[in-house]
Amino acid sequence: MRLLHALRGEIISFISDADIPPYAILSHSWGEEEITLQDWQGMSTAALGRRKGHPKIRYCCEQALREGLEWVWVDTCCIDKTSSAELSESINSMFRWYANSKVCYAYLSDVDFRHDRAMFNSELCKSRWFTRGWTLQELIAPSVVMFYSKDWRLLGSRSSLSGLIHSTTLIEPKFLNGANLQLASAAKKMSWAAHRQTSRTEDIAYCLLGIFDINMPLLYGEGEKAFRRLQEEIIATNPEDHSLFAWGNIVPRPSIEIANPAQLSGITEIPWVRRGKLLGLFARSPRNFAGSGRFINTRCAAVYYRSNRGRITLPVPVNGGIRIELPVIPGGFHSVYHWHRPKMSQLRQGLITVLLCCDEEHPLWLVQIPLQRSGFLNYGRTGDLLLDDTVTLERETVLFRTLRLLHVAPEKPTDLGCGDIILRRHLFPRKYQASNWKGGTGYNEFDDDGVLSVNGTIYDRFISIGYEMPEEVGEDLGFALCFSRIMSPTPGQRGSFSITLVPVILDGVRERDDVEHGGIRWVDVRQALGMVSPPYGHIMSAPCDTWEFDVAPFPLVRVTVEQMELEGEDIFVDVVDIVISERQGDTTFFQ
């Protein structure tokens, strides 16, 4: 640590903390012609005095001498910013340096001393000093903070101005007056920085290192990755603080939820809207926490992690996301995903996971996050938060029985190829549970985004989906929907999409002989995709057609295929809707 001698003007390095003398420290917002270490050591006194950044250093030294302190620390001239190693060490040490100072002088260069209290309060609250990222720790860390006007007249102390500072910064007075920062949740501390700015993108993360008691290397040039790295370090140090994920806006229901039966079944269209990409659990910026200062940690989270060490999976950052074990509300919900290419709305599985953090006004209510399927074994989130009295700490023991290991990460783009198939809608009553998804030779199955990639082979038998029949129809009986595309003999045409329904035997252990039951021939499920003359089928007309199948004892089946072109490319995809429903009109679907 370097210190400036307030009288002699020498800058001296102190290697050991034990050798550091008592010192005052200056807090300010940077302006024009700041004086660097090289300037201080290489310029004459007269030349330094002409720099715009010199008066505040002189004021600081004079004030320190009046208070019996010979040494001061000023960030502009006491750090060699040409050395990346020294800069990194200094930033990682800065919170401690402010905390160890005898007094901090906060210099507000845009505030005049005024006797009119109302005008003074207004001007103080608007000071640029309260909008800068670095001054957050400079406000909180020191034991004593004294505020000075542009002409170095005392405005008041942090203690005497705590009410005004609280209304400006939303930092509770107890944390302004020395309360242990470990008592503040991660969300609360992030909210303090939500409306602050830094000149460099990375500094909005680096300026919070001390607030969270984190040390990490500085990598200027990494941009927003710095803030993600900070969050990874926070959750690694304190895995029980789920408030780190409680950012966004509280809504009455998920913005991605679809509950309208007509829209679910495809009778009416789901309106397409332009949307942002699905996000991970980590926020992009402290700005995301603007409304999250209300969220606090729960005792159950601490008990949960500390009493189950070794038996649960601690949060682990993986590939830009995080793998975490969280309670999940049983049942899930139907959610909508809006594709940009092609422009259409798709139903996807949604689930609601529970964070082990609460709201200050409702300390029993647990924060919930809606998630949506996004990529292979991955979920993404929007900026939605749910908070109500349906999920509370009173159900703590029940929630811990619904734990699920999840990978939550930002959405990655889906690269569609010509002839790929998108399953836009796949709904069926629970009793007809889909039992297998079988792709043709060399093909993938539908992935978690509902996409079947045909790998460039556009015409073939692609996939069969098997469904169980109720036991009253017959044991191990079901049916398979098989999809293929037939090449057109006419040049320039893309061929037709073909759908067949095959009654099948679903014994997955051994191959079964065909059986006759109820006047219907049932074949082994392994034969469904390759069957030469299936009993039921339909060739879909391009560009859009619907096949409705109504033969007892099978349920009602409606399949729609719509051929869509990708804008700006000679590429098409087939978009498929499958809706299976009870004859009694039950509209409860399982996805």
Image (spheres, helix red, strand yellow):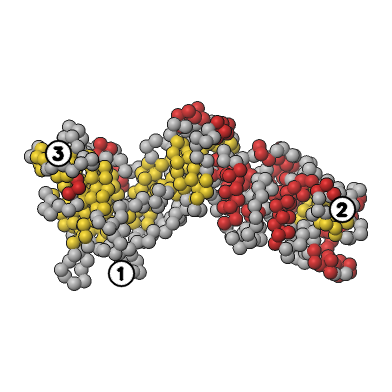
Q: Residue at label 1?
A: 570
Which residue occupies the foreground of this view, 119 or 187?
187
Q: Position of residue 516 (x, y in %)?
A: 9, 40
Q: Is residue 465 left or right of residue 91?
A: left
The label shown at residue 406 is none
Q: Total label count?
A: 3
Measured as percent of width and height from the top left, residue 551 is found at 13, 43
Of circles 2 and 1, the one toward us is 2
- Is residue 262 visible to us here? no
Disc 2 from disc 1: Cα separation: 72 Å
Q: Which mark is residue 553?
A: 3
Question: Residue drawn at (46%, 47%), measured in percent from left and top?
Answer: 408
Is 114 situated left or right of 414 in this image? right
Residue type at tag 2: Trp
Near mark 3 (Cα within 10 A), the count class, few <14, some 14-19 or many ≥20, is few
Among the two numbered marks 3 and 1 on one chain, the one whose residue lies closer to the N terminus: 3
Relative to residue 369, is residue 1 depicted above or below?
below
Q: Are marks 3 and 1 in contact (CB under 8 Å)?
A: no
Q: Residue at x 63, y 59 (%)?
A: 219
Of the residues under marks 3 and 2, which one precedes in the sequence?
A: 2
Q: CA distance from mark 3 to mark 1?
A: 43 Å
Say if 163 sits above or below 39 in the image. Answer: above
- Badge 2 crowding class, 10 Å Cα cut-off, few under 14, some 14 to 19, many 20 or more, is many
- The answer to which of marks 2 and 1 sits earlier in the sequence is 2
* Image coords of residue 217 (percent x, y): 65, 55
Residue under label 2, please give it. Answer: 71
Asked if residue 201 shows in the view, the reply is: yes
Say which of 119 and 129 sits in front. Answer: 129
Q: Amino acid at mark 3?
A: Pro
